[in-house]
Image (cartoon, helix red, strand yellow):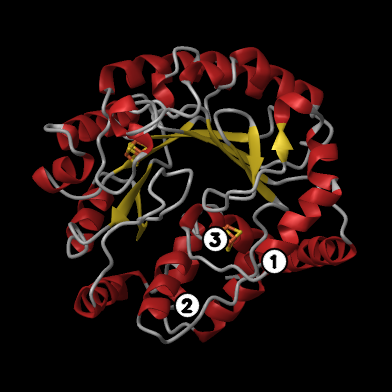
């Protein structure tokens, strides 16, 4: 409990710094980067169309895999922007399927060499367990703190159906087993909720916990990034009710508890969004975006220094445009909550599960993986 308050006090102090710079229109050094390094994907998920981006059967291909950033572009980016990235806490490599990049180990090495203080992890669909194991072994030789997150949308055939691949569940399980055998800690499993798996939250959570991994669930999103701007089938009121009931078990988890409160109409988002200010998305072509849901690009990492790009007048116009938008998208919420902890503190003080929250915090869940 004392640890919780002392960390909260530190966060409150730094949040004043971020808040004042934002109101003065001054860009600050980023804290988080979400970095999809390829749109290539070997899955066929029902809730995401990234896997269709390079398939002409689904329409015109606007940009090709050859247009994606090369290893040198990424290495130059971290080298040339080292000063501006000095406060960076984490880079999450994702995709598509990030492990489909032959040079993924070299990408991690290049980032780690320039920014050794930064936490690096890869989010994967786990469909290539042997290849992933091989790459993890390589990475662990120079970066022992490496982390992975494996998507898990259901047990057995439910996961297979969500991912559109027979045997996807077994492969994801094998990836987790390998990662554990290799000594990886802090493995997380995220469950994407749609009308096809909305009633399976508790069974997936139990499975994930039995494996010693961290569970979280979130709604499927729609955006240019996911290639599904038309969105997924909407939940009925009854389905939302079922989700809300299952989330009761996660009253100690800031993100999931607030998801429950929002869908049951008990609360609205009050957390300010700092995406595009303290956190950014860099897409596989090098475009710097505020988040995975917004479309406007601040600029491209191949065309200038990060600091100059995100300090430009046009970047401030984009931030102005996003001022009123609200979402409850997990990766974006957690980065804003870490920077601006008042909301988390308010939620904590209101909660009847303070002891459980404090325990979860001690397990490094609260501030690392909200
Ligand atoms: S959710 Fe992930 S694994 Fe599924 S299609 Fe999209 S990028 Fe691929
Ligand atoms: S509220 Fe959501 S959509 Fe809007 S900028 Fe923040 S993360 Fe992006």
Name the quadrant of the N terminus. Answer: bottom right
Whether tag 3 and tag 1 are in contact, CB under 8 A, the answer is no
Q: Mark 1 points at which residue?
A: 6
Q: Is mark 1 on a helix, strand or loop?
A: helix
Q: Does the residue labelled 3 lie within 8 Å of ligand 2?
A: yes
Q: How crowded is mark 3: few (under 14 residues within 10 Å), some or many (20 or more)?
A: many
Point out the frontmost of discs 2 and 3: 3
Q: In this view, does 148 lie above or below 226?
A: above
- Lateral position of residue 216 relative to residue 13, left or right: left
Residue drawn at point x = 41 percent, y = 54 percent: 222
Residue at figure coordinates x 84%, y 62% from the top left: 17
Along the horizontal axis of the image, is 359 left or right of 19?
A: left
Tell me which residue sits at (25%, 56%) in the image.
205
Q: In this view, does 211 lie to the left or right of 292?
A: left
Residue bearing mark 2: 354
- Residue 10 placement (x, y as % from top left): 75, 63
User: Residue 2 lies in what quarter of the image?
Assistant: bottom right
Give the secondary structure at mark 2. helix
User: Dot 3 corresponds to which residue?
Assistant: 333
């Amino acid at each position: 409990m004392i640890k919780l308050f002392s960390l909260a006090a530190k966060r409150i102090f730094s949040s004043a710094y971020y808040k004042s710079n934002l109101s003065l229109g001054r860009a600050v050094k980023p804290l988080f980067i979400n970095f999809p390094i390829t749109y290539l994907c070997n899955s066929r998920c029902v809730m995401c169309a990234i896997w269709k981006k390079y398939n002409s059967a689904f329409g015109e291909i606007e940009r090709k895999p050859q247009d994606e950033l090369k290893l040198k572009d990424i290495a130059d980016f971290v080298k040339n922007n080292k000063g501006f990235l000095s406060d960076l806490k984490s880079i999450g490599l994702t995709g598509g399927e990030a492990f489909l990049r032959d040079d993924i180990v070299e990408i991690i090495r290049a980032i780690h060499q320039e920014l050794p203080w930064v936490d690096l992890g890869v989010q994967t669909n786990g469909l290539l367990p042997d290849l992933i194991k091989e790459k993890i072994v390589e990475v662990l030789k120079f970066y022992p703190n490496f982390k992975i997150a494996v998507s898990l949308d259901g047990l057995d055939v439910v996961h297979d159906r969500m991912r559109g691949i027979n045997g996807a569940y077994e492969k994801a399980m094998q990836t987790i087993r390998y990662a554990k055998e290799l000594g990886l800690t802090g493995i997380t499993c995220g469950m994407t909720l749609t009308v096809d798996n909305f009633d399976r939250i508790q069974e997936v959570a139990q499975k994930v916990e039995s494996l010693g991994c961290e569970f979280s669930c979130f709604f499927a999103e729609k955006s240019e990034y996911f290639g599904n701007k038309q969105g997924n089938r909407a939940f009925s009121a009854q389905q939302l009710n079922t989700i809300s009931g299952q989330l009761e078990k996660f009253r100690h988890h800031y993100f999931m508890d607030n998801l429950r409160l929002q869908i049951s109409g008990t609360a609205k988002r009050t957390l300010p969004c700092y995406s595009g200010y303290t956190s950014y998305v860099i897409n596989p072509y090098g475009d710097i975006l505020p988040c995975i849901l917004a479309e406007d690009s601040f600029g491209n990492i191949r065309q200038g220094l990060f600091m100059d790009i995100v300090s430009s007048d046009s970047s401030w116009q984009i931030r102005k445009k996003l001022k009123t938008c609200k979402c409850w998208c997990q990766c974006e919420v957690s980065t804003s909550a870490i920077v601006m902890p008042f909301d988390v503190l308010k939620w904590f003080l209101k909660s009847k599960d303070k002891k459980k929250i404090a325990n979860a915090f001690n397990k490094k869940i609260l501030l690392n993986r909200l």
